[in-house]
Image: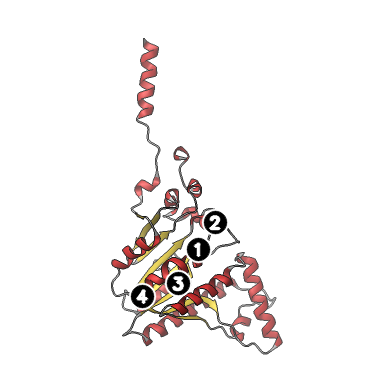
């Protein structure tokens, strides 16, 4: 009897066990699709002059659709009623006549490609976005970069100074967006699409210098900028350091029929887009919940 009672006690104790799930402590909203999630965010946004959209860049060719392709197919059409211009983090083709600047531009592009591992499909996705704006009432703008600026990104040994490049990209995004906002102040807003560091309204030190969004918000009177970060689960799941992000445990809820929205702060949202399958959720799910 004593043995049976002891076993019964263990069974009851185990029945009361609960595996800790960090998602339980992260306030978030879930939606059936991207359009519903975006409409909910836009419904709560007032006086937006800049839609600062950021992505976690793909580092290799993947079966999953890129954030840029998802933005083109699922989101930009929802922003058309609000925005007249789109600024894309992509260089405009320039006319570098001197052979030395030609070589500098080629070297810059090659080194950035090698260091970041950006997929070859990126140019195609940018072209698809620009083509999509042609069907909408939105004018697309790239970032003008002169030959001198391209050469200035290389040190004396011809290597890219990546911090200098990030700062330059930030300045270009800021200046282009601000000029369009000021020109269109009585009309519709501006969409800016780039990396998730550049659009950060709450940048961590020492990343303030590579965020145009928090600077632009101050210049617009302390509001007017809406930050939206797009997360494709299959792309970010195995990125180094991504597990330090406060929203990372929410990947444990990633699924094909689920969009997860986490509010970082005022006017700042992270959208975890639908996953291709529920398998990717295992990356962030506690062992006991596998």
| Quarter of the rendering containing residue 183 | bottom left
Q: Residues within 10 Å of mark 2 (few under 14, many from 20)?
A: few
The reply to whether the C-beta atoms of the residues labelled 3 and 2 are less than 8 Å apart is no
- Single out the residue that lies furthest toward the top: 1
The reply to whether the C-beta atoms of the residues labelled 1 and 2 are less than 8 Å apart is yes
Q: Residues within 10 Å of mark 3 (few under 14, many from 20)?
A: many
Residue at 58%, 86% in the rendered image: 146
Q: Position of residue 197 (x, y in %)?
A: 47, 67
Q: Quadrant of the N terminus?
A: top left
Q: Earlier in the sequence, mark 2 or mark 4?
A: 4
Residue at 39%, 55% in the rendered image: 260
Observer-side mark, 2 or 4, equals: 2
What residue is pinned by disc 4?
A: 217
Secondary structure beneath disc 4? helix
Observer-side mark, 1 or 3, equals: 1
Separation (CA) of disc 1 from disc 2: 9 Å
What residue is pinned by disc 1?
A: 56
Q: Position of residue 17 (x, y in %)?
A: 37, 32
């Amino acid at each position: 009897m004593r043995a049976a009672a002891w076993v019964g006690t263990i069974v009851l104790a185990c029945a009361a066990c609960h595996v800790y799930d960090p998602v339980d402590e992260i306030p978030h909203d879930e939606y059936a699709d991207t359009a519903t999630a975006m409409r909910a965010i836009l419904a709560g946004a007032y006086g937006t002059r800049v839609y600062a959209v950021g992505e976690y860049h793909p580092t290799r060719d993947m079966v999953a659709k890129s954030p840029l392709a998802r933005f083109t197919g699922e989101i930009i059409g929802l922003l058309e009623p609000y925005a007249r211009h789109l600024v894309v983090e992509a260089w405009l083709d320039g006319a570098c006549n001197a052979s030395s600047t030609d070589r500098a531009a080629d070297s810059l592009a090659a080194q950035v490609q090698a260091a970041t591992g950006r997929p070859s499909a990126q140019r195609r996705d940018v072209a698809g976005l620009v083509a999509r704006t042609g069907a909408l009432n939105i004018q697309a703008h790239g970032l003008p970069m002169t030959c001198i600026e391209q050469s200035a990104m290389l040190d004396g040994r011809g290597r890219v100074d990546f911090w200098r490049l990030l700062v330059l990209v930030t300045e270009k995004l800021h200046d282009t967006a601000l000029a369009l906002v000021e020109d269109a102040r009585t009309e519709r807003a501006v969409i800016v699409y780039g990396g998730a560091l550049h659009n950060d309204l709450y940048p961590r030190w020492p990343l303030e210098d590579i965020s145009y969004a928090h600077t632009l918000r101050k210049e617009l009177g302390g509001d007017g900028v809406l930050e939206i970060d797009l997360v494709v689960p299959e792309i970010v799941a195995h990125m180094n350091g991504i597990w330090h992000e406060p929203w990372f445990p929410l990947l444990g809820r990633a699924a094909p029929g689920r969009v997860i929205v986490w509010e970082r702060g005022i006017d700042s949202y992270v959208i975890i887009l639908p996953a291709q399958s529920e398998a990717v959720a295992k990356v962030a799910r506690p062992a006991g919940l596998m």
